[in-house]
Amino acid sequence: MDILQLDRHNRLPKKQKGQRIETPTSFFIRYYYTDEDGKRKQKAVKLADKSDLYRSWVDVETLIAQVMDGINAQTEVLTGQQTLSEFIEGHYLPWCRANKAAPTANGYDRIWQRCWKAHVGGIALTNLQTAQVTAVLTHHAKAGLGSRSLSHIKWMLSGVYVYAISAGIVPKNPVLEAKWLVKVARPQKQTEYSLEQVLAMLRILEPLDLRAAVAVALCYFAALRPAEARGLHWADYTGSELTIKRTVWRDKVGETKTEGSAASVQVIEPLRSLLEKLRAQSAEGYILQSSTGKPLSLDSLNCRVIAPAMEKAGIVWRGYYAGRRGISSLLTDSSGNIQNATGILRHSNSGTTARHYTQPQKRSMEAAMKAIEEMATKPEETIE
C-alpha cells in the first residue's frame, strides 16, 4: 500500500449533511452508509409525517440533527420513528427504573400498560398528535376516571416527551395541550384521621400487635410515608428524633422520594412510648420487622391486623396516608402556620401541603366564626 492509499484509508470519513426529501405527506432524510460487505449504499429515513407539529423543514431540523449526528458518529440512531411502545418500554421505563423511586417507576409502568399502550403504542414518537392524546383522555373520562387520575395519566405521557426532547430525539411535545372534552366528577375530598381517631386506634392495636400501633403512630405523629416507616432502622432513632434515610418498597431498599425527604423528625408522645416498648422486644435491624428480620409488609399488617380490628371497633380505616394528612391539618390549625406542616411532611414547598394534605378544621372554624359573630353584634359605640 503506497502512501496515498494509506492516507485515504486512515482519513476520517467526511461528515454527511444528508439529502432532504419531502413528499406530500412526510419528511425524509437520505444518507450513505457502508454495509457488511464494505459497499456504500444509500438509505432514506422518515423523520415525521406532516402535521400541525411538523409543517415545514424548520420544524424537523432537530430530527435531522439527531439522525445525522448518529450517522456521523457511527452510533445507534433514535430517529423518533420508533413506536411509542418501542421507545417507552425499551428506553424510557428502564431509565425511570434506574433514576426514579421504585414506586414512581412502577406507577408509570402501570399507567402505560393500562391506559396508553393499547391506544397509541403503535404510533411513532414524531407522529403522535395532540388530538389523539385528547381522544384517549376523553375515552378514559367517559369510562369514569376523575380529574386527578386523568391528570396522572396525561403527565406520565408528557414526561415521556420531556425525556425525548431532552435527549434530542424529538423537538416538540404533543401532550401539553391535550385535554379531556367531557365533564368529569369532581375529585373526592382526601380523607384524614383526627387526633381522637388515632388515639382510639392505638388503644385497640397495641395489645393486638405492637408493630401495628407503631406503624399507625409513625404515619401520624411523625408524618412518615409508609415506605419510609418500613425503611427505619433502630440506629436511626435517638430517643427524641428519627432520621429518615431510606425507603423500602416491596422488596427494594432505595433512597427517599426526594432529597428533602431525607431529614430528621421529632418524636413525641405517644409515639415515643410505643417505640420504647417495641425496642425492648427487638433493638437491632429494622424498627418494623418480620419474624425473619426483614422489613415488615405494611400491606400484610393492614390486612391481617389493622383493618379487621378497625371494622370490629366501628372505625373507618382509610389507610396509612390518612394519618399523614391528618397531622398536617392539625399542625397547621394549631400553629396557624402551614410552613410547620410543610416542614414535618418534608415537602419542597407549601403549595403541595396546602393542596393535598391540609383541610380546614371544623372546631377552629366554628370558634373563628363565633368570634366574628360577637364582633358583629356588639353595640355600635364599642366597635373600633
Image: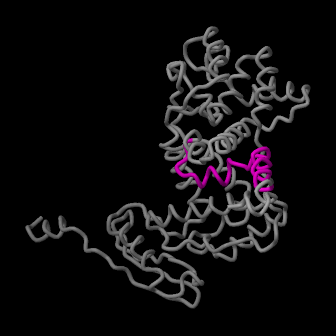
The magenta stretch spans residue 177: no
Q: Is residue 290 left or right of residue 54?
A: right
Span highlighted in magenta in the image: 346-373
Residue in the picture at 71% in, 40% down = 326
Residue 286 x/y as whole percent: 58, 20
Q: How many marks?
A: 0
- In the rendered view, tell whether residue 98 sits above or below residue 142: above
Residue 97 x/y as whole percent: 54, 45
Residue 239 x/y as whole percent: 54, 18
Q: Quadrant of residue 195?
A: top right
* Residue in the foreground of this view, choosing between 121 and 267: 267
Question: Where the N terminus falls, by quadrant?
Answer: bottom left
Q: Is residue 378 left or right of residue 175?
A: right
Residue in the picture at 59% in, 55% down = 351
* Residue in the foreground of this view, choosing between 347 and 42: 347
Q: Is residue 229 left or right of residue 28?
A: right
The magenta stretch spans residue 365: yes
* Residue in the foreground of this view, choosing between 315 and 225: 315
- In the rendered view, tell whether residue 214 sits above or below residue 4: above
* Residue in the foreground of this view, choosing between 144 and 196: 196
Residue in the picture at 82% in, 70% down = 183
Q: What is the basis of the colouring in this image?
A: one colour
* Magenta-drawn stretch, dominant element (helix, strand or loop): helix
- In the rendered view, tell whether residue 87 sits above or below residue 4: above
Question: Where the C terminus falls, by quadrant?
Answer: bottom right
